[in-house]
Each structure stands twice: as structure tokens, then as C-alpha cells.
Image: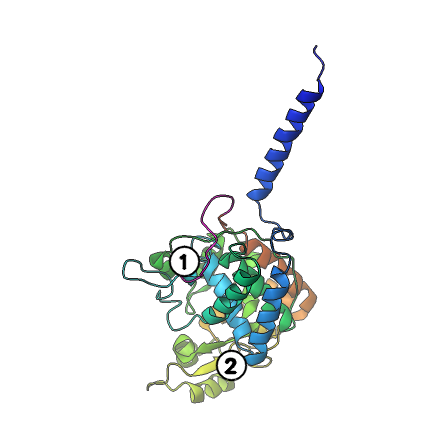
Amino acid sequence: MGSFNSLDLIMILIVATAFLLGANGNKLTPLHYSQTCPQALSIVKGEVAAAIESETRIGASLLRLHFHDCFVNGCDGSILLDDTANFVGEKTAAPNNNSVRGYEVVDHIKAKLEKACPGVVSCADILAIAARDSVVHLGGPSWKVKLGRRDSTTASRSLANTSIPSPISNISRLISSFSSQGLSLKNFVALSGSHTIGMAKCTSFRARIYNDTNTIEASFAKSLQRKCPANGNNGDNLAELDHQTPTHFDNLYFKNLLKKKGLLHSDQALFNGTSSVDSLVKRYANNNEAFFKAFAMGMIKMGNISPLTGNKGQVRVNCRKVN
């Protein structure tokens, strides 16, 4: 049996190092920008804080942006692409059109990052970091955001229309939607708790407050009917998803469901006395720490849906258009 000489050993080390670098290059890690843009996280955090201080609601909007991005071909920043004469993106899909907000905040964050570290931080990663920072700023849990996503060069309006759950979805449709993304029942219920912050338009809950008489508390329905009359041009009127603490991230969303005070049909579908998720709703309603832990785990898992890594995709210079 021959012995290794020093040249053999050097070659083995080179190959092993290349393999490890290649593996890490295709795997998300919280340390992805530690060398290439060490100030990235602090820049995003500062801009998110400033945006929320200017308009508290934007925190929920930034969280929703990440969710709507990840559910369509993975977390690839595709939702940020503007339509052009030759391209139809996801912004005008039914779940997003005149509904999803926060694009200008992302533009502002991207401009700051491009000035500090040109061509380094992806738009998809900005969405993931901004979602976490929004939750933390509003009193919710923190988690280590895995980074290294690259940006798509395309988008899918048709998938956006079919992959993002509707506010009128029933429980089986909701479970199926999350399951198709590789998310468990526990992930689904915990991530639904994101509706502890933010607001919804009258058009998304009008049918519920007039038709769901068996699953909505009567006085709650009446108070909403004053904001959202059955007829008229008031579809853009807003109501809080959590009527108690709409700008604080907590477990009151689940407590509301126990009292039949979920704003959306798809919210109350999580707790109706018969569904398979009733026990999880009760658990999170009674244990804020358990909710926070499950939510953080769910966000990490959602953020890992089909990311573009390595040489796939690109790092857009302008999040609204392909380089």
C-alpha cells in the first residue's frame, strides 16, 4: 500500500475545501453576508424600524410580503418584479393587487444596501430579514434568518392566483395549501398567528360578517357591519385582524378565535369546535411562549421554501426589475 506524499495531501485539502465551499454556497446560513456585507443586517433593521415608526401597519405588510413571495415558486423575490410591456408579474395577481404593500420600503432598503455593498444582498433575503425585524419590533419573537437566497428572473401570476390562500378558504383548503409548500399542521397554525398584527379590507370579510352567523360572535359582527355595510362603495374600509392589540405581536389572535372573533372566514376556520387544529389554537391561546417558539420555527421553515442558491438566479440591483 503506497504512502501519501505532501503533494497528495495538498491536493486532497484543495478538493475538500472546494467541496465544502460548494456545499455552503448552495445552503442558506445566517452568516452568508458576514464577510461580504457585514453591515447588511443592521441596515435592514434600521430601515424597518424607521418605516414602522412612520406607519405601524407597515410591519404587518412587510411580513405578508415575505409570505406571499415564498408561496409562489419559493422565496425568490419574484413578487417584487414590476409588470412590463413584455412581462406580467405577480403584483397584479388577485391576492396581491391593491392589497400587498411595502414595496417602497424594500426599494429604500435596497438602495441603502447597494450603496454599502453593491450587488451583494439579494431582494429575496431583504424580504426574509425585514419580516423578522418587523415581528421583533412589534413585540414578537426573534429567530436567526438563514441567508443566501438569490433573486428570480421571472414570476408567475397564475401560480400567485392559485397558491396563496384566500380569506374565504375553509380549513381543508388551508391545510392543503400549506402542506403543498412542505409546511406541517403545526407550522400552518403558528404562521396563521401572523394575523395578530395588520388590517384587512372590507371586501375580504364582508361575506363573513353577514353570512357566517354560526361562527361569529353577534356583537362583534355588528361592530364590523358598521365599518363594512352590505352594500356601497366601501370595500377599502379597514378593520384590524386582531381587534384588541392590532399593532402588538402576541397570542391574542388565538384568544379571539376561541370567542368566535376571528376577522376573516379563513381565520375562524382554525377553530370551529370540530377541526383538527382546535387543540393547537387552544394551546397557543393559553401559552404565548409556545406560540412564539412555533412561529419562529415556522418562519425559518417557510423561508427555506425552494430558494435559488449558488449560480441560480441573480442578485438584482433594482428589486423591481431583472438586471
Q: Quadrant of the N terminus?
A: top right
**Residue 252 visible:** yes
Q: Nearer the viewer, residue 275 or 194?
A: 194
Q: Which residue is mark 2?
A: 217
**Three-letter amino acid code at the position of disc 1:** Ser
Which residue appears at 57% of the width and 43% of the height? 25
Q: Which mark is residue 7?
A: none
**Three-letter amino acid code at the position of disc 2:** Glu
Residue 108, image x and y in percent? 51, 69
Which residue appears at 46% of the width and 50% of the height? 314
Q: Quadrant of the C terminus?
A: bottom left
Specify the quadrant of the image occupied by residue 49. Answer: bottom right
What predominant SS class does the magenta segment belong to? loop
- From the viewer's perspective, tell me whether residue 235 is left or right of residue 181: left
Q: Secondary structure at mark 2?
A: loop
In the rendered view, tell whether residue 238 sits above or below residue 319. Answer: below
Whether residue 174 is in magenta: the answer is: no
Q: Which mark is residue 163?
A: 1
- From the viewer's perspective, tell me whether residue 97 is left or right of residue 77: left
> In the displayed image of the protein, which residue is found farthest to the top?
1
Mark 2 crowdedness (10 Å alpha carbons): few <14, some 14-19, many ≥20:
some
> In the displayed image of the protein, which residue is found farthest to the left?
85
Which residue appears at 72% of the width and 14% of the height? 3
Q: Which residues are magenta?
A: 309-323
Q: Nearer the viewer, residue 301 or 147?
A: 147
